[in-house]
Amino acid sequence: MRVLRTLEHMTMLVLGVCCFLASLPAAEAFGMLSSQYVQSFHGNGLRHAPSKPSRPQAGVQSSSALSMSLTLYGSQGSRSPLVNWGAYELGLDLTMGNLGENPHPFGQIPCLVDTESGATLFESGACLNYLENVANVNGATSKERGAILSWIAWANASLDPICFLETPDGKVYDTGLKKPNKRIDALDRMLGERDYLLESFSTADVAVASYLLYVPQFFGGIDLSRWPNIVSYMKRCAARDCYGQAFGPNVQTSLVNALSAMEEKNDGGNTNNNEKKLFGMF
């Protein structure tokens, strides 16, 4: 009898609750049930009710997922390490591919493949731009990303021909940084006002500094002291851990030492110039 009465009471209670909820708007009724659901977990000693996983934004991958899908075809002594540098600065790992399987349409390097998206990138600037846009780990604004894209394009289209003078068949025979250059003068003035191209280090610096740093790397003994701000900028970039990881510690040490010697020459030159001006006053 007690069991039957208990079941009768429970049935009446359930019917009463259903009738009450039926008289409410659907959203309000759902909210009350959800509240009771959460409170039931609190009562069992759980501090929080299970939360619904956040929905990922379209076209955005986590850096760990992206790292697993990136394969770079390249080698030291080429332009491909600058892609490594950019990836490491963005917190991404690269798998180095077998050059015998390089999918570059002209058989050159670097070539970057993202197996997750199916994208194949060739030309170093395109690779850097892809890494920056897809990873976007720094949450760069449209303004910042526009500036980064512009500097990457400038490095490939304008700085490269200055740094590397080529024969008609594409062989590098010298560097244009042995002579004065108005564009490099302008860059030197910009870097006299800030440490990096943007407010802080970015992929823009990877693109520009890589080409500048290739010059003393391939043309030993060159003197760039006519551009003191660029020399200091190059040294700051070359001293970064990710640069050493990408280009190797030997290249890094050699460049930092060479650029330090140029800085010392500038310091000595400034001292002599100041002394001349001082004595010229009398």
Image (spheres, rainbow, N blue to C red):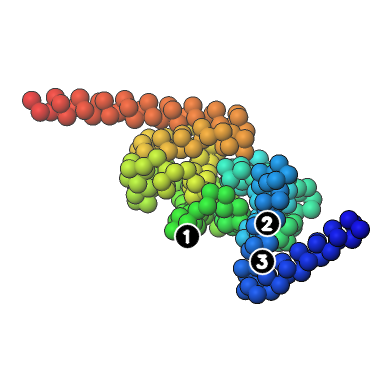
- In front: label 2 or label 1: 2
> Which is more N-terminal, label 1 or label 2?
2
The residue shown at (51%, 32%) is: 239
Asked whether, in this view, residue 166 is left or right of residue 278, the answer is: right
Quadrant in which the C terminus appears? top left
Q: Position of residue 65 (x, y in %)?
A: 70, 50
Name the image quarter holding residue 167: bottom right
* Disc 2 secondary structure class: helix
Asked whether, in this view, residue 185 is left or right of residue 92, the answer is: left
Name the outermost residue toward the front: 1
* Disc 1 secondary structure class: helix
Name the image quarter holding residue 246: top right
Up/down of 205 relative to 253, above or below: below
Asked whether, in this view, residue 57 is left or right of residue 15, the answer is: left
Amino acid type, callout 1: Ser
CA separation in Å, label 1 and label 3: 40 Å
In the image, 24 versus 56, the foreground residue is: 24
Which label is found at residue 56? none
Is residue 180 shown to the viewer in this render?
no
Amino acid type, callout 2: Gln
Q: Which residue is mark 2?
A: 36
Which label is found at residue 142? 1
In the image, 179 versus 64, the foreground residue is: 64
Quadrant in which the N terminus appears? bottom right
Crowd class of label 3 (few under 14; some 14 to 19; many from 20; radius 10 Å): few
Is residue 192 shown to the viewer in this render?
yes
Which label is found at residue 30? 3
The residue shown at (61%, 68%) is: 28
Q: Are marks 1 and 3 in contact (CB under 8 Å)?
A: no
